[in-house]
Image (spheres, rainbow, N blue to C red):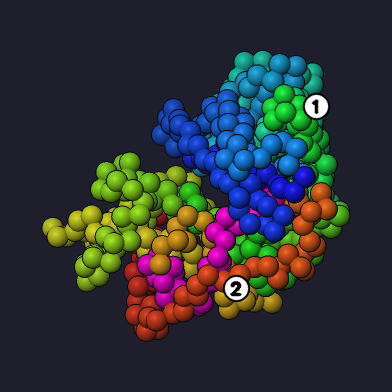
Amino acid sequence: MTHILAIDQGTTSTRAILFGPDLRVVAVAQEEFPQHYPASGWVEHDPSDLWSTTAATARAAIERAGLGAADIAAIGITNQRETTLVWDRATGKPLHNAIVWQDRRTAETCQALKAAGHEAAVTETTGLLLDPYFSGTKLKWILDHVEGARDRAIRGELAFGTVDTWLVWNLTGGRVHATDATNAARTMLYDIRQGRWSEAMCEMLDIPAGILPEVRDCAADFGVTRADLFGREIPILGIAGDQQAATIGQACFRPGMMKSTYGTGCFALLNTGTDPVASQNRLLTTIAYQLDGQRTYALEGSIFIAGAVVQWLRDGLRLIRSASETQALAEAADPGQGVVLVPAFTGLGAPYWRPDCRGAVFGLTRNSGPEEFARAALESVGYQTRDLLEAMTADWAGGGDTALRVDGGMSASDWAMQFLADILGAQVDRPRVLETTAMGAAWLAGHRAGLYPGMNEFARTWALEKSFVPAMAPDAREALYARWTRAVAATQAF
């Protein structure tokens, strides 16, 4: 048993990646699934899509590698966080579609809780803010709106989980109802300092405690798969939410190390060590990882729309056929037009936290075309990242490393990464292996299985592919960023 199977269940697709004994990628299988938008600001997934694409891609990756289940030492799982599911413990049937992390339907609930003075307690206990982004109010919505759900939850008939928990339940044939500390920390129901579900948070949201999964370390025993899935039982030995898995995959193990992942959204994490740091700038305090019962914390900034802005160019405006076209368009754009796009399609994330905002474009002229839209879309990701990093450096007295480690699909664009370095005024480092999220999950499972090395030796395997250093004059940088901040202020005012 020399290989590790990493399941990377994301917002728009599911991937399964096989890693060899040297932590190299051996085979990849990927499958997209539909997004459902039943109302403005609502985003849902069919739970059966999450499970079926997981099973299909896992089998496909093993087959493409020319391997069998007997070659797989363990499975590691990483997942889109905060997405919320509730199902029947007896049948495994979901009560409702999964409510996705991007969903804004509980904005009024969050506002009412804020008005009632609850946000300070939420932040102190969970490290989070009162925002529809997190799982707690989504779970409350399902219990409130599905007929009979709350009574059934009280009777112990229902199970709640984030996507990792849903996958473990299905992989193990309903034998294991568990999550890891990083996913639990995103529910708004978990006390990140005490390391347990919070009675106060459950009471605030009227959540029966019996619906919640058991919380385990990131590298732990999460049961074994059903024998019929792959031909033999395979142990599940690692779980981490996608951004925490990327932090591990980027080997950001020292306090002060930062990574930023550019997927559907953008998520920057700063390792702050064994003590949680309370943000004064509306960032999140979260668990970076938990190993051997020891929690390591991070400050996190969350941007809801990063790679999704390129999907919007493709699917919404139909200006491009594929994401790869954006770089050439951005290079051909007229920089003198100064088009600014604020992609608040599902609200503004950190550090603004305005779920009511919607997207806006500024500076259009008669000559504005696909080139200018593409450039503004890529630039918006750099601007939003600067918003996060400025808040992080203000929050943490230790400061951050001078280099930002990047990964995710958009990090493959040299143009976007150079603009990121320019607008940050900081070095941006892209690793040779961009599959850092899956690698983090693979390392957790592989280390637990005894196949992969410990943390320090694993960190030494991190290899640089390219560094981007600032080439923009400081006054030009500040002028561009000032224009962005004006655009965000105008968007919020509208």
What is the CA distance from the residue labelled 2 to the residue labelled 1?
Answer: 44 Å
Confirm whether the magenta stretch covers residue 62: no
State the residue position of label 1: 175
Residue 284 x %, y %: 64, 57
Q: Residues within 10 Å of mark 2 (few under 14, many from 20)?
A: some
Residue 53 x %, y %: 56, 32
The image shows residue 343, relative to residue 335, as above or below, that is above
Residue at left 63%, top 57%? 24
Residue 88 in the figure: left or right of residue 363: right
Residue 245 x %, y %: 66, 53
Q: Earlier in the sequence, mark 2 or mark 1?
A: 1
Residue at left 37%, top 84%? 473
- The span shown in magenta is 415-443
Looking at the image, the residue that sits furthest to the left is 366
Residue 146 x %, y %: 60, 19
Question: Does dot 2 land on a helix, a strand or a loop?
Answer: helix
Confirm whether the magenta stretch covers residue 432: yes
State the residue position of label 2: 393
Question: Does dot 1 land on a helix, a strand or a loop?
Answer: loop
Identity of the amino acid at label 1? Arg
